[in-house]
């Protein structure tokens, strides 16, 4: 690649990141559903026409945000998976990493929650759609591997299920717990519970079930 082509590619990447930064800032105030392309273009200080060069429509922009969110989530999961201890210890660490991610990056979590509510991946996906699903696969593989390591070292019972089934079930449990903490803080308080207590309880139940199958 020659110098001019390299500079053009760098400029394209920078502009795309600027647009995603703008979308994230708008979503932090208005929410993912209320976000508009006009708002993002104004925030990024570009024309609406230029915005559509990078993202064909709002769903495409949403997929771009999800791809970025999943890259950040992969970093967190990878760090958790490197912690010393058994496979079960790493699975629990990944669960806590997901909770921490949702608290630290609420816009990313909201974007992913909308993404996960979609139907199965479309055939022949391209562009941001394909990138988003590929990023999701990489995140899931980290959890699959941690569960498999736990079954190999004996910290997770093989009778608990296949690594994929266990991982996807745990993903669903922790996702639901995060939503419950976000939306039912008052109700939890009425019962003397905090979000942290609920997370700890969910992980304790999951760990007990995985140990004994």
Image (cartoon, rainbow, N blue to C red):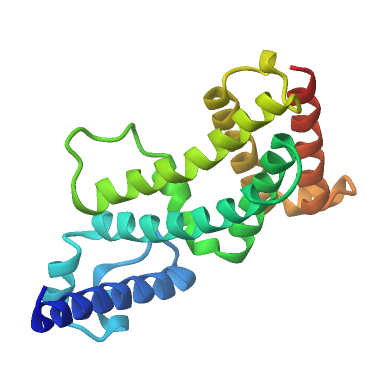
Q: Is residue 36 visible?
A: yes
Q: How many marks?
A: 0
Residue placed furthest toward the bottom: 45
Question: Percent position (x, y) of residue 29?
Answer: 47, 73
Compared with 176, 103 (above or below) is below
Residue 99 position, x and y percent, is 65, 52
Tell me the quarter of the image containing the C terminus: top right
Q: Which residue is at a point 77% across and 32% down the rendered structure image?
A: 207
In the rendered structure, the answer to whether residue 174 lies left or right of residue 145 reads: right
Nearest the eye: 43 or 17: 17
Q: Nearer the viewer, residue 50 or 193?
A: 50
Q: Is residue 181 above or below residue 68?
A: above
Q: Quadrant of residue 11?
A: bottom left
Which residue occupies 40% across, 40% down? 137
Residue 157 drawn at (x, y percent) = 72, 19
Q: Is residue 44 left or right of residue 77?
A: left
Residue furthest to the right in view is: 192
Viewer-proximal residue among 67 and 89 = 89
The image quadrant of residue 42 is bottom left
Say which quarter of the image contains residue 45. bottom left
Residue 33 visible in the current orientation: no
Relative to 100, is 105 on the left or the right? left
The correct choice, above or below, for 44 with respect to 117 in the image is below
Name the residue located 55 percent from the left edge and 62 percent from the top edge.
106
Residue at position x 32%, y 82% in the image: 43
Residue 42, compared with residue 176, is above or below; it is below
Q: Position of residue 159 (x, y in %)?
A: 68, 13
């Amino acid at each position: 690649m020659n110098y001019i082509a390299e500079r053009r590619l760098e400029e394209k990447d920078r502009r795309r990141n600027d647009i995603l930064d703008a979308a994230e800032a708008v979503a932090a105030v208005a929410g993912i559903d209320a976000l508009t392309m006009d708002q993002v273009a104004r925030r990024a200080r570009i024309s609406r026409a230029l915005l559509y060069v990078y993202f064909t429509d709002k769903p495409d922009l949403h997929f771009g945000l999800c791809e970025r969110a999943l890259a950040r989530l992969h970093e967190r999961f990878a760090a958790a998976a490197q912690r010393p201890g058994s496979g079960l210890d790493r699975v629990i660490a990944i669960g806590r990493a997901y909770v921490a991610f949702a608290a630290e990056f609420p816009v990313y979590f909201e974007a992913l929650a909308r993404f996960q509510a979609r139907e199965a991946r479309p055939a022949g996906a391209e562009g941001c759609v394909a990138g988003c699903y590929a990023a999701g696969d990489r995140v899931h593989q980290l959890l699959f591997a941690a569960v498999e390591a736990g079954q190999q070292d004996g910290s997770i019972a093989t009778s608990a299920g296949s690594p994929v089934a266990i991982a996807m079930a745990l993903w669903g449990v922790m996702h639901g717990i995060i939503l419950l903490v976000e939306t039912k803080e008052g109700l939890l308080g009425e019962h003397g519970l905090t979000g942290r207590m609920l997370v700890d309880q969910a992980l304790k139940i999951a760990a007990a079930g995985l140990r004994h199958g």
